[in-house]
Amino acid sequence: MSLDLSRQPVKGIFFTAISLPAALGIWLLVHGLFGLDYAASSLVITICFSFFWQIAWSFGGWPANLVTENRWLRGSLNWILLMALVLLTIGCWHWYYGEPFQDTDIGLWGSTAIVAGVISLFFFGNTLLLPAEMGEKQPLSGFVNALWGLFLLPFGLLLLPSMAGNEGLYIPWIWFPITLVVMGYFGGWPFDAIPQPRAGIAYIAVVFAGTLAFLAVLKVAGTDFFTEGASAEKAAIFGATWTNVGFVYAWLFNQYPLGDLPQPLKGLAGTGLTLAVTGVVYAVLVSSFGTADLAGVVFGEFALMWALVSFAGIGLFDAFSWGYEEDPGGAGIGLGRRHRTESPPATQPITSTGGITDV
């Protein structure tokens, strides 16, 4: 008897299980084969994420879908392309500055490129740069978002000021677990009723306010993200753990078994559940490793994070939307209320960026 990987909880269990050995492989490749220290290894994952929002999201499967629609082969081809771009980018920064890539501003560029990708694709539903009817037109959509995410915003905020002798502006990654709360668990509620682009502005404002509150809680707890040493590493571990738990819950399990709850109950329940699991995992991690090993824990979290999103990315192996394509009414979260009571709508509620507008 074969298992149906398009249904929950089988889908979530399967992809979570294979993410663990995949994370180990990433660890052995980046930290072992290339011999990078933990800080430089984590930096490589940052660069991976800067391209994730382009190859695994904005391009929507292009160019590998020109060759095959097989999920596994398409994902493998695009993942290899993505990693080739990461290596090329690292090589370019090393060549231009004439020093090891980890000694350049490549990490600041990558962090800001991630923000740019999330703004366009997550907050504004791919309508910030393109009209809605052209959001799925490839490769136009992908190239426009790549120019914005990889060049315009990060270069404008970071590199142009630095070329003029001023401090560049970059945005660290700690905001992302709050983004999962707003855009994942709450599904944008209540601002999802507002048309774009005003909804995107509201999402940015809420994430900004939530991030400030999150940073304040971390600081009061003695884990200040912006300090040096163990305190900052513990804050990073908590933030990365919450992000990983969120990816498992929202992107691999599609918020199973809470997906049928109405908002805002679903959002509150998802936030509470992920925080509870994060607290337990965090306590185990910081009690199991000494201060000298915390940098390794941070990289381990990042390696797992990259494995999780590699399987979830809609342009890669697309675990996130697997099941929604065939059954938009119930899809990954189970049968679903609408699937049990009425036929699926004529128009599938899957946005051009892979987000589910009604689950």
Image: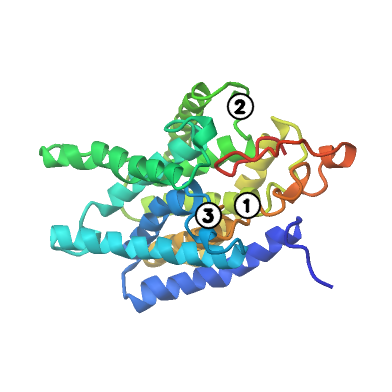
Percent position of residue 316, x then y: 54, 59
Please give the label number shown on residue 320. Answer: 1
Category of crowding for the residue at label 1, using alpha-carbon neighbours closer than 10 angstroms: few (below 14), some (14–19), many (at least 20): many
Secondary structure at badge 2 equals helix
Kindly report which numbered mark, 3 or 2, lies closer to the viewer in this rendering. Answer: 3
Residue at position x 44%, y 31% in the image? 128
Percent position of residue 156, x then y: 25, 37
Please give the label number shown on residue 192. Answer: 2
Q: Quadrant of residue 47?
A: bottom left
* Viewer-closest of 70 and 167: 70
Residue at position x 40%, y 58% in the image? 48
Q: Earlier in the sequence, mark 3 or mark 2?
A: 3
**In the image: residue 77, left or right of residue 355:** left
Q: Is residue 171 above or below residue 12?
A: above
Residue at image mark 3:
61
Extreme-right residue of the structure: 341
